[in-house]
Image (tube, rainbow, N blue to C red):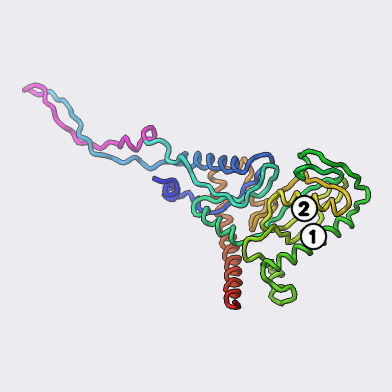
Amino acid sequence: MRAAAAAAAAGTALQGLFAVYKPPGIHWRAVRDTVERHLIKGLNSLQRPEPRQQICFQPTVSEKETGKELTLTVSQVPMLADHPLVSGPVFTELKIGVGDRLDMQSSGVFVLGVGYGTKLLRKWYNAHLTRAYTVTGLFGKATDDFSDAGKLIEKSTFDHVTREKLERIVSVIQGSNHKALLQWANLDLKTQESYELAVKGLIRPMNKSPPLITAVRCLRFEPPEFQLEIHCLHENQQYLRKVVHEIGLELKTTAVCSQVRRVRDGIFVLQDTLLRTQWDLPNIQRAILQAKQKVEAELHNSLAHLNTRADGERERI
């Protein structure tokens, strides 16, 4: 029996999306593999159905006046093929799909899918949902990979940098990215449609686009350290580190990124994530059920909006 069919037969409810917390310094593939091992262990620990019975003719010898007589007795015995020592574990593998990945240095919300959740991940990708990060930077140095763990290539002073100057640069970045977002979404900045979509948070590219920042603000300014909250589309974590580097250059200094932490992916936020001690069958089942309605609503609204926009584009053409 295939794993998915066995899971359904056992009533495990392993069908959908859930989020775990990925710690820094661990590869995303190791997270997925660990979750898979824990789920397989949990599924194999479930009580198995009673073994099937088979008819067996057992010979018996009885003493009679004429001597010993061999007779056959009909009985039911469990099928050896159903014994765990013969059949082995029911589950040996379980397909776990992954959403938007996090690199080794990054941490935070990491979406996974199991069962038909692996198909939902494709819809999740096509919905062009925004993700949010907290990004911590350090003024005063530059490295070859924009992170504080990279090879140091330059040091600089930063006494002239103020929170006001940082927020001014942040505002410029948000403004330029907003214009680019409207272009990729095929919207006119001055139209009522653009305003209404902006209010609803539904301004999204019609297709795959370069990384776009939808919102950014300064959370903390304690030189040499500062922290930003960045909402974005189609990004990767190296892009966010480069943003920190470019902010340093705009402020006539240098800066490196010391931490990238994803705090939201679509409807999943940090509070929804399962910690490493919770990567087991009962907790994952519970997380899938709790997220089910929110996931369906988010995908329905986002994909319906994009399909309506696409139809409108085709009519204009």
Report the side of 281 relative to 233 (left or right): left
Question: At which x and y percent is residue 225?
Answer: 84, 46
Magenta segment includes 68: yes
Report the side of 175 relative to 265 (left or right): right
For mark 1, give the secondary structure. Answer: helix
For mark 2, give the secondary structure. Answer: helix
Decide: few, some or many residues near mark 2? Use Cα within 10 Å; few <14, some 14-19, many ≥20: some
Q: Residue 17: which numbered mark, if any?
A: none
What amino acid is found at the position of numbered circle 1 in the picture?
Ile
Which of the 4 image quadrants contains residue 191?
bottom right
Q: Front-most of 253 and 39?
A: 253
Image quadrant occupied by the C terminus = bottom right
Residue under the point 55% across and 57% down: 122
Whether 222 is drawn above or below 128: the answer is above
Report the side of 74 relative to 169 (left or right): left
Question: At which x and y percent is residue 178?
Answer: 75, 65
Residues at marks 1 and 2 touching, judged by CB atoms closer than 8 Å: yes
Question: How many tags in the picture?
Answer: 2
Residue under the point 81% across and 39% down: 152
Q: Which residues are magenta?
A: 64-86
Magenta segment includes 306: no
What amino acid is found at the position of numbered circle 2 in the picture?
Val
Residue under the point 68% across and 48% down: 108
Outermost residue toward the left in this view: 66
Q: Residue 173: which numbered mark, if any?
A: 1
Q: CA distance from mark 1 to mark 2?
A: 9 Å
Question: At which x and y percent is residue 47?
Answer: 43, 41
N-terminal of the pair, mark 1 or mark 2, is 1
Which of the 4 image quadrants contains residue 132?
bottom right
Q: Front-most of 163 and 44?
A: 163
Which residue is disc 2 drawn over? Answer: 243
Q: Front-most of 181 and 136?
A: 181
